[in-house]
Image (cartoon, rainbow, N blue to C red):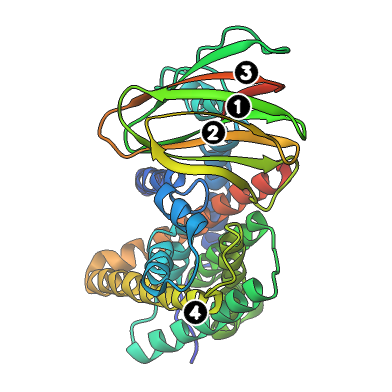
Amino acid sequence: MQQQTIALTKATLFKYSIFSMIFAAITLLTIILPAEYNIDPTGIGQALGLTVFNKVAAEKTSSVSSQKVTEKTKATVETIETIEIIVPAHSGVEYKFTMAQYQKLSYQWVTSGTALYFDLHGEPEGDTTGYFESYAIATLNTMEGSFTTPFSGVHGWYWKNTADTPVIVQLTVKGDYAKHGLK
Amino acid sequence: MPSRLQQHCLLSLTILFALGLPIEVFAHGVDDNTRAFLQQNTGMQIIPFLYIGAKHMITGYDHLLFLVGVLFFLYRSRDVLLYVSMFTLGHSLTLLFGVIGDIQVNAYLIDAIIGLSVVYKGFDNLGGFKHLFGKSPNAKLAVLIFGLFHGFGLATKLQEFQLAADGLMANLIAFNIGVELGQFTALAFILLMINFWRKHRTFNHFATSTNCLLMSSGFMLMGYQLTGYFIN
């Protein structure tokens, strides 16, 4: 059976093929790449406000994301830090600390009332398979404890909010970590 | 010609917005609930895996675009069945083989190849291969080959979750059957719409622009995934 196709002249076929490529290239350069990867060669993505997604990923405060991070001082040794994380309604947030192997982090967190499903886990540095190790999984509105990292990488919480309103998590930490932020 | 071009742009924008929706939801390949389930799952869970498989297929826009391309000029049920069987055979083989053999293929590259399949089908529908080589390539073989790649994509995504060995085989088969069910559901809707549209004059009128856009979307998927491959 011969597949049915559209019969175009060579010139028209050429024109349509070129059009599809140019259209794809323009869309990629002005919309998709700025929004997905923060690659914005034309500056149009920035102008359209499409680069905001990456600002969130880059741990910066963004009004669009409705996630606010209050950082006091950069943690050196034995400073106590309090971080406020907003978990929007019907979504999950990951907050991670970059730590070397066998380092300790003491923590205490409390939500604004609602109990949240959470998964406290670590992901090895340089891992691309998506592997992680969970230290605690539960649904609670507060928890206090500490953990020692089994490997170097990022360690922290995944909180999931199933309620209709945003939940604020107030996290207080003390330990040896290089940096921290939303992931 | 300018008005035709305007129509292209309008249609394209609509499709773009539609494309934009699931990207956020599937940023990790699966949504939050599914992720939590997969991470905690142990043992045989037939129905949940059936559901995840079906959902994956119905919400995968790259796959849906490919189906639109394949079905565009197919209307005899015998042909539809034949093509779907070839695709199923392809991705079932690589899905089972990939997970059991613990084969990891880069997800970006696989998704770029799926993008290429959309370009291929759009170009084929436009009669491009007939112009270049005098005839279309063997469409059944092409569908089988792209099916093989798609299976590797599914296998890679599933392996990210370190599935428990307990009940793995049964879960995989359930997932694969779910993929089939999802595919049939998607197929039924696409076929219904295309067959309905085929009866109208506008079908022939827009056949060229639709396939041109299909090709363009394929290029976008390729660019998107290849960029991801190179920067990660």
Q: Position of residue B182 (x, y in %)?
A: 37, 71
- What amino acid type is highlighted by mark number 1? Thr
Q: Which mark is residue B139?
A: none
User: In this rendering, would B220 be left or right of B213?
Assistant: right
User: In this rendering, would A89 be left or right of A46?
Assistant: left
Residue B123 showing in the rendered view: yes
Marks 4/3 in contact by CB < 8 Å: the verdict is: no
Q: Position of residue A119 (x, y in %)?
A: 50, 41
Please identify, in this view, whether the residue under mark 4 or under mark 3 is nearer the observer.
3
Mark 3 residue element:
strand
Residue under numbered circle 4: B170
Q: Residues within 10 Å of mark 1 (few under 14, many from 20)?
A: few
Residue A147 sits above or below residue A64 on the image: below
Marks 1/2 in contact by CB < 8 Å: the verdict is: yes
Mark 1 residue element:
loop
Residue found at x 74% / y 29%:
A103
Residue under numbered circle 3: A174
Residue under numbered circle 1: A42
Which image quadrant is residue B147 in? bottom right
Residue found at x 51% / y 59%:
B215
- What amino acid type is highlighted by mark number 4? Ala
Tag 2 and tag 4 share a subunit: no
Residue under numbered circle 2: A30
Q: The disc numbered 4 marks a residue on which chain?
A: B
Which image quadrant is residue A105 in? top right
Tag 4 and tag 3 share a subunit: no
Q: The disc numbered 1 marks a residue on which chain?
A: A
Nearer-N-terminus badge (3/2):
2
Mark 4 residue element:
helix
Residue closer to the observer: B122 or A150: A150
Residue A8 sits above or below residue B21 on the image: below
